Image (spheres, grey):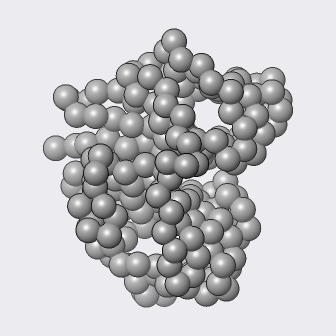
Amino acid sequence: MLIRIRGTDLRVSEWSGGITRQLAIFPDGADYEKRDFLWRVSSAVVFLDESGFTALPDYKRFISVIDGEMLLEHGDGGRIRLTPGFVYCFDGGVSTHSYGKCTDFNLMLRKGRCGGGLSFLSLEKGEQGEVRAAQESRGRSRSVILYCIRGSGRIRSGADEEPFAAGDAFAAAGGGTIQIECGEDAALMAAEAYEIG
């Protein structure tokens, strides 16, 4: 099953350094502020040259920049520069500060409860790509969230098919693979999350 995530359905929140749009959260009804979620996919626009990350000690974080650049600096002295297409994973409990105005894409996974990852897909005009779709794993749900950064084409999962363009997002469920066919050069983010244990 392929579900289009509409902009009007996104939960938008403002924070000291920008705006965050929540694309998906699990389980349904979970609340980021209460920290009662198992996983969350979001995108943030960072307006300030410098900002601090919220401490999330119970979560593993994946982040990628989809527009601009960001330098992350951890409390232990580690530094990492994020550019479009590069995915970085870190412990949400580590003190983290960011430098640079950008738009980022995030996946948060509850430690010990969820597995998964974030990947960047770059496809040329006429090229076809595949992403493993959501499927059941030991009786527990598995989800894939796709977000189109640029370009256009068509996306298929099972019997469902939808056109996509920049800014479109989809959730896939029901097994099989997600097939992507590009009408022009395209870039997408794919977040996968599943319960473990």
Q: How many numbered discs, if any?
A: 0
- Say which of 55 and 20 sits in front: 20
In this picture, residue 139 sits left or right of residue 148:
left
Percent across and percent down for residue 148 are: 66, 43
In this picture, residue 39 sits left or right of residue 176:
left
Percent across and percent down for residue 172 are: 46, 31
* As drawn, 22 above or below 135: below
Percent across and percent down for residue 146 are: 55, 40
Q: Quadrant of residue 186?
A: top right
In this picture, residue 189 sits left or right of residue 118:
right
Q: Which residue is depicted at the point 68% across and 33% down?
A: 164
The residue at the far front in this view is: 8
- What is the quadrant of the C terminus in the image? top left
- What is the quadrant of the N terminus in the image? top left
Percent across and percent down for residue 91 are: 37, 69
> Does residue 141 appear in the picture of this structure?
yes
- Say which of 102 and 70 sits in front: 102
* As drawn, 186 above or below 81: above
> Does residue 118 appear in the picture of this structure?
no
Q: Which residue is depicted at the point 40% across and 28% down?
A: 173
The residue at the far top in this view is: 159
Q: Which residue is depicted at the point 62% across and 24% down?
A: 162
* As drawn, 90 above or below 8: below
The residue at the far left in this view is: 197
